[in-house]
């Protein structure tokens, strides 16, 4: 079973920041949080990952709460090409595998 | 260009036939994975391989088989024992499985339809 909970869908206006929440209340101290996205009928694309600290790269920022029970992916200036399903994933420590949930369908509107 | 290729993009088979899906990578990655995705669902792990000539079952291995004879190749066979094989199949690779991070690179997928 997935170890994360995400809203099934969200809208965001083009040019605004898109904030995607994720709950992972049962995460263990040594398990990473990963974010991927999947544009319709394509293979998923890696976005970012983190353990405890906030992370930023050229695509997005990842904000992890101090208790590690939730996180937020931030796309700073959403474009129409950011319309996709976004998956928040916990990497299981025992076998390093990614446990995928159903994700959040993000729709960017002009 | 480095990447993962899967062929074919669309595949149709009759019920009861075995079918093999191809996955090739030129990223020099040690680890490779096969996932299944059903409509509106996340990915579920079928098999993974950490090194040549070794592979492990994932969460839904029943009715599937794999081989890993070469580092760059990880074919998946969907056997007649798989009760509901129609799905989108994704292959992925990563540098390894045991590092502190594990970015997986995905192929474009094969959509299998069993008639």
Image (cartoon, grey):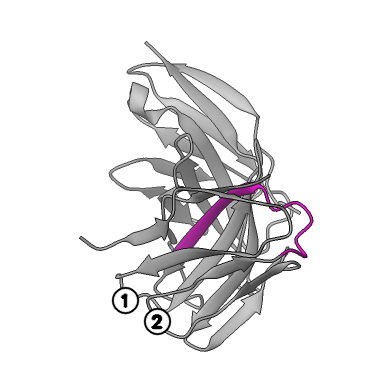
Q: Please state the horizontal and vertical placement of residue A21, each as a whole percent of the image.
A: 58, 35
Q: Are marks 2 and 1 in contact (CB under 8 Å)?
A: yes
- As displayed, is residue B41 above or below residue A17? below
> For this view, does A16 lie left or right of residue A72?
left
SS for tag 2? Answer: loop
Asked whether the residues under marks 2 and 1 belong to the same chain, the reply is yes
Vertical comparison of A78 with A38: above or below: above
Q: How many marks?
A: 2
Q: Residue drawn at (41%, 55%), measured in percent from left and top?
A: B107
The CA distance from mark 2 to mark 1 is 7 Å
Query: Mark 1 highlights which residue?
Result: B28
- Element marked by disc 1: loop
User: Comparing marks 2 and 1, which lies closer to the viewer?
Assistant: 2
Report x, y in % for residue A28: 68, 63
Residue found at the very far bottom of the displayed protein:
B53
Report the residue at 42% width, 58% height from top.
B6
Q: Nearer the viewer, residue A20 or B49?
A: B49
Query: Does residue A30 appear anywhere in the picture?
Result: no
The residue closer to the viewer here, A105 or A90, is A105
The region drawn magenta spans: B80-92
Chain designation of label 1: B
Asked if residue A55 shows in the view, the reply is: yes
Question: Pointer 2: what residue?
Answer: B71
Q: Residue furthest left?
A: B1
Return the x and y of residue B36 as percentages of the image width and height: 62, 54
């Amino acid at each position: 079973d997935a170890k994360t909970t995400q809203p099934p869908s969200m809208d965001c206006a083009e040019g605004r920041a898109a904030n995607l929440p994720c709950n992972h209340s049962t995460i263990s101290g040594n398990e990473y949080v990963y974010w991927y996205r999947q544009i319709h009928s394509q293979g998923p694309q890696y976005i970012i990952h983190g353990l405890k600290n906030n992370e930023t790269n050229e695509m997005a920022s990842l904000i992890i709460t101090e208790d590690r029970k939730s996180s937020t992916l931030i796309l700073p200036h959403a474009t129409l090409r950011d319309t996709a399903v976004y998956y928040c994933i916990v990497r299981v420590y025992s076998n390093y595998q990614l446990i995928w949930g159903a994700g959040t369908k993000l729709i960017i509107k002009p | 260009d480095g990447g993962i290729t899967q062929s074919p993009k669309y595949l149709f088979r009759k019920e009861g036939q075995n079918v093999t899906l191809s996955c090739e990578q030129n990223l020099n990655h040690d680890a490779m994975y096969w996932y299944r995705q059903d409509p509106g669902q996340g990915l579920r792990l079928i098999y993974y391989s950490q090194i040549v000539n070794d592979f492990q079952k994932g969460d839904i291995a029943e009715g599937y088989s794999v081989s890993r004879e070469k580092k760059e190749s990880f074919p998946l066979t969907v056997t007649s024992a798989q009760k509901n094989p129609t799905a989108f199949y994704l292959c992925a690779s990563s540098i390894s499985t045991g590092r502190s991070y594990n970015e997986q690179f995905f192929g474009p997928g094969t959509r299998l339809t069993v008639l």
